[in-house]
């Protein structure tokens, strides 16, 4: 739950607030799915702006994690991030260290594409996409091709085509992708729409689409993200916490 994204620089002429981060929605959905939810925040922001009421409404006042502290982040099984356009370098670096120590990451949408920028080394260390640039596709849906089978997308096979609202994200220059990345879905032009990564001891799932709920995928509600969280946490995708 990033105060910096919620209140900082914006490309839409007004603050992003916490809506794009699905702060309330995700906390409630994951609590309902029996996850023990904590809020990863920038230190000192728990008393600022909208965040106190979000924490209070979700029973997280005493369940915050200092997102600048890699040891604190590494105490979590898995972190889920929804569209954090502005990411402090300290948080990106802490997240990178924690993942390499074994904490999982599920990232829906973009991270750090506004600040510090898609091609920033701290962003690329987390995304695994090299010499990256911001990619705007527009508001029309895209046909996305399944490239690899994987437990989190059980039911989809290589060659299957699904329709997804791919709006924007990070595009690696000349297809430069880290060796530990496996792309599960591609859309044109060479855009890794869904991929998994083994980063040190940790696992990453990145879904580069904007809308959380995608009717073109055969997974209702938060089902896909729960499967991704389980896999990233080194559990069976159907595990119940």
Image (cartoon, rainbow, N blue to C red):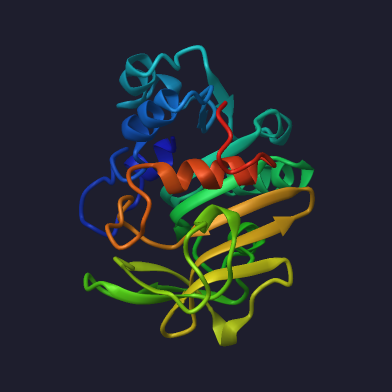
Is residue 50 visible in the rendered image? The answer is yes
Is residue 56 rendered to the left or right of residue 100?
A: left
State which quadrant residue 6 falls in: top left
Q: Residue 165: x and y, percent?
A: 29, 65
Residue at 33 percent across and 77 percent down: it is: 143
211, 147: nearer the viewer: 147
Q: Residue 170: x and y, percent?
A: 47, 69
Residue at 27 percent across and 57 percent down: it is: 215
Residue at 25 percent across and 73 percent down: it is: 138
Residue at 65 percent across and 30 percent down: it is: 76
Is residue 223 rendered to the left or right of residue 211?
A: right
219, 173: nearer the viewer: 219
Q: Residue 56: x and y, percent?
A: 36, 14
State which quadrant residue 240 falls in: top right
Q: Is residue 183 above or below residue 102?
A: below
Q: Identify the residue at the far front of this view.
A: 155
Is residue 173 rendered to the left or right of residue 128?
A: left
State which quadrant residue 221 falls in: top left
118, 129: nearer the viewer: 129
Q: Quadrant of the C terminus?
A: top right
Is residue 90 visible in the rendered image? The answer is no
Q: Is residue 159 above or below residue 82?
A: below
Q: Quadrant of the N terminus?
A: top left
Q: Residue 69: x and y, percent?
A: 67, 33
């Amino acid at each position: 739950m990033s105060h910096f994204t919620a209140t900082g620089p914006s490309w839409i002429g007004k603050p992003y607030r916490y809506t794009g981060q699905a702060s309330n929605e995700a906390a409630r959905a994951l609590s309902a799915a029996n996850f023990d939810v904590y809020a990863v925040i920038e230190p000192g922001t728990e008393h600022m702006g909208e965040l106190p009421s979000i924490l209070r409404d979700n029973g997280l006042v005493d369940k915050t994690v200092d997102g600048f502290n890699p040891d604190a982040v590494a105490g979590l099984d898995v972190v889920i991030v929804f569209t954090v356009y502005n990411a402090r370098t300290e948080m990106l670096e802490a997240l990178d260290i924690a993942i390499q120590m074994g904490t999982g990451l599920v990232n829906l949408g973009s991270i750090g594409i506004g600040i510090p920028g898609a091609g920033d080394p701290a962003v690329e260390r987390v995304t695994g996409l090299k010499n990256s640039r911001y990619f705007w596709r527009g508001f029309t849906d895209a046909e996305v091709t399944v490239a690899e089978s994987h437990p989190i997308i059980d039911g989809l096979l290589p060659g299957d085509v699904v329709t997804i609202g791919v709006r924007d994200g990070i595009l690696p220059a000349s297809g430069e992708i880290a060796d530990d990345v496996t792309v599960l879905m591609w859309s044109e032009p060479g855009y890794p729409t869904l991929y998994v990564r083994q980063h040190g001891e940790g696992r990453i799932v990145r879904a580069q689409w904007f809308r959380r709920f995608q009717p073109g995928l055969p997974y209702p509600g938060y089902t896909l993200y729960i499967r991704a969280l389980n896999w990233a946490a080194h559990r069976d995708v159907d595990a119940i916490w």
